[in-house]
Each structure stands twice: as C-alpha cells, then as structure tokens.
Image: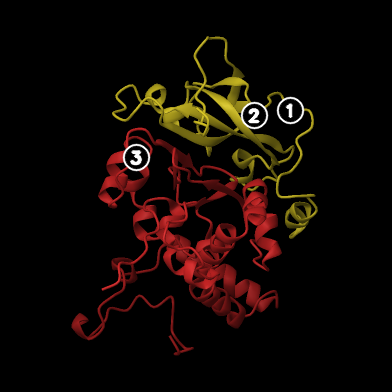
Amino acid sequence: MRPGKRAQARRERPSTYTPAPGRRFNVGDRVVIKHAFPPGHRRTPYYIRGKEGVIERICGAFPNPEEVAYGFDGEPAKVLYRVRFKQNHVWPDYKGPARDIIEMEIFEHWLVPASGRAKPARLPQRND
Amino acid sequence: MSDTSFDYYSHKKHDHGHGEHAPVAGRDEGPPSDYEIMSRAMQELLEAKGVVTAEEIRRRMEIFEEEFPYRGSRVIARAWTDPAFKQRLLKDGKAACAEMGVDLEATRLIAVENTPDVHNVIVCTLCSCYPRELLGMPPTWYKSDNYRARVVHEPRSVLKEFGTVLPEHVTVRVHDSNADMRYVVVPMRPERTKGWSEDRLAEILTRDTLVGVTVPRVPVKG
C-alpha cells in the first residue's frame, strides 16, 4: 500500500458521520449479534455475541478492522452501527434495574435480523 | 531527558543503587520489548527519511499532556452556556468542536447527554479507546482490567466506588467504545452555577465527569 493513501481516503470522507448507502439495517431495527467465534482480530466483544439489541444510530462506513489489523486496506468499507441492549438481557445475573442499558458499535457483517418478539430497550423521555 | 546520547538499546545493568532514581514503571527495567524496539526503529527510519523530526515527536507528546486534557472542559462549558451549540455537539461532536478551533483530527466524536433520567458512562472493553484529542491520555484506571470488565457488568457498583450513587429511577447507559467512535459525556449543569463564565464552569468539568464516573460539583465555600 502506498503510504498516505488510506489517510487521504479518510480525509476525503465528507463528514464525521459518513453516509452508508446500501446498508441492511435502519435505526430501530431489532438485530441479533452473530454467535460466532472466528479467530483473528475482531471488534465484537465476546460478551455481546448471541445477544439481541436495537439499532441506535448509524455511524457510517469504515475500513474493516478485521482486515486493517493485518496490514490490508480494509476495503470494501463496512457499515458500522451503534446497537443498544438491555443489561438484564446481556447479563442474566445483572443486579441493577431492568431499565439499565449498554450500547456499542457493531459492524454490519456481525448482525442478523432478529426474529423474536423481545421488547426493545428505549431511553426514558421527559414526558414518560 | 535532555541527554541526546541516551542509548535506547543499552542492555547494560545499572551499577548504582535504585534509590538514586526510582523507575517510573517496572518496564523501564531490563531490555526493551519487541514493540519498543519496533517503535524506536520506525521513528529512526522516519527521521532518516526526513518525514518527521525528533523535535516534532517530542512536541506532539508535549501537546498531549499540556493542551489536550483541557479541551474537553472548554467544549462542554460552551455547551452548558450555549443551547444551540449543545444541540450541534450532540448531533455531530467533531464538527461542533471544530467551530471552537478544537481539531479532533481522526477522532469521530459522539457526545452523550446526562439528564435527570439518564446517566452515561464510557469504557472500552477491548483496549483503551478514549477521546485523546479531547481529554488527553486515558487515566490508569480507565485502562485497568478491573474497570473494563466490571463497568459493563455492574456499572452501579463501579460508579459507587467512584463516589457516584445513582437513584434507582435513573437509567444507567454504558457505552462500550469498541470500534471507530469516541465518546464524551455532557454532564448536567449543577444549580448554583447561574451566571458563571465558561472558564469558571470549565473548572468543575473535570476529566472524570466527562467520562461519566462522577458528576460536576460546586465546591462548598469554606
């Protein structure tokens, strides 16, 4: 790879929230994180694999860290989502209130559409 | 570190007592690790090719310690005094910081707001991802296995250890900063700060309030 080529590609991205045309999911969609344990550099924490959550926002498309970690250019870029989970779903022994939540960034290829009927976690609003 | 002839590759044992200069960390003892050697070799190559100078690298490290740690407080103090700025910060953190002349470089920032009903706290369970261009270097506890493993699983216990006890009705919202975004908390502005200048507000916006392990407090007059 030519030095600076990727840095230049990053600079040319139009905004801090990069557009992600052709993405599979939208805000509010329920998803399950793949319950898979491939070797290598993965940004999907173990504790969240197999868990169900809701898309909180779309972060944009980013070079695939699973490739970048080994010196490849990370192209094609992968769509990155923020996913919200209920804590008492993530941790069956969770001691805090049922309203507590945890959110993290998950790349699209780790997501599958949820088929269950679990109620998605939501943030309390002032008029609740 | 003014001795420019310092030999990074010296494996020679010290021949004097350690009481004379206690090591900063245990890793300063013994031969350098493979990564230290690799990093040093890379720097020497970049210098030899004229890409960077040792002075530029030293200056960069200095900025990390002298300037970056104060940026976050300034940005959030502005958000406290300017509601329109706060909305822009919540919408696109990096663009809002740029308005203030704070260049976050490659960092993409998500600002998350504390409310009477929601308390945010930030962690990186995979390593120590942290908004360095906004808060400087992460504190030791932020990088510890203890904090990283526990704050996702028992956030209320961890917050209590930091002196932050949250009522049951408040939703604790943990952010695992595990990929490309970085996070900063917009704490609630305490009462009794009406009319305060941004500079004065920035003083109570400490690093830990912006990571979310504590909340800003107005010092009690003594």
Residue B150 in which image quadrant = top left
Name the residue: 56% across, 43% down.
B179
Please, which chain is the residue tagged with disc 3 on? B
The amino acid beneath tag 1 is: Arg
Question: Does dot 2 land on a helix, a strand or a loop?
Answer: helix
Q: Hey, what amino acid is under mark 3?
A: Pro
Query: Given contact means CB atoms under 8 Å apart, are the residues at marks 2 and 1 in contact?
Result: yes
Q: Which mark is residue B155?
A: 3
Instruction: Tell me the CA gap for discs 2 and 1.
Output: 8 Å
| Quadrant housing the N terminus of chain B | bottom left
Q: Which chain is yellow?
A: A
| Same chain shared by disc 1 and disc 3 | no
> Label 3: how many residues lie within 10 Å, few (<14), some (14-19) or many (20+)?
many
Q: Nearer the viewer, residue B122 or A32?
A: B122
Same chain under badges 2 and 1? The reply is yes
Give the label on residue A125, or none: none
Seen in the picture, residue B205 relative to A72 is either above or below; the reply is: below
Residue B175 locus on image (x, y percent)? 48, 41
Q: Residues within 10 Å of mark 1 (few under 14, many from 20)?
A: some
N-terminal label among 2 and 1: 1
Q: For mark 1, what is the residue?
A: A23
Circle 2 residues within 10 Å: few <14, some 14–19, many ≥20? some
- Which chain is tinted red? B
**Which chain does the numbered disc 1 sit on?**
A
Q: What is the three-letter code of the residue carrying label 2?
A: Glu
Colour basis = by chain
Residue pointed to by mark 2: A108
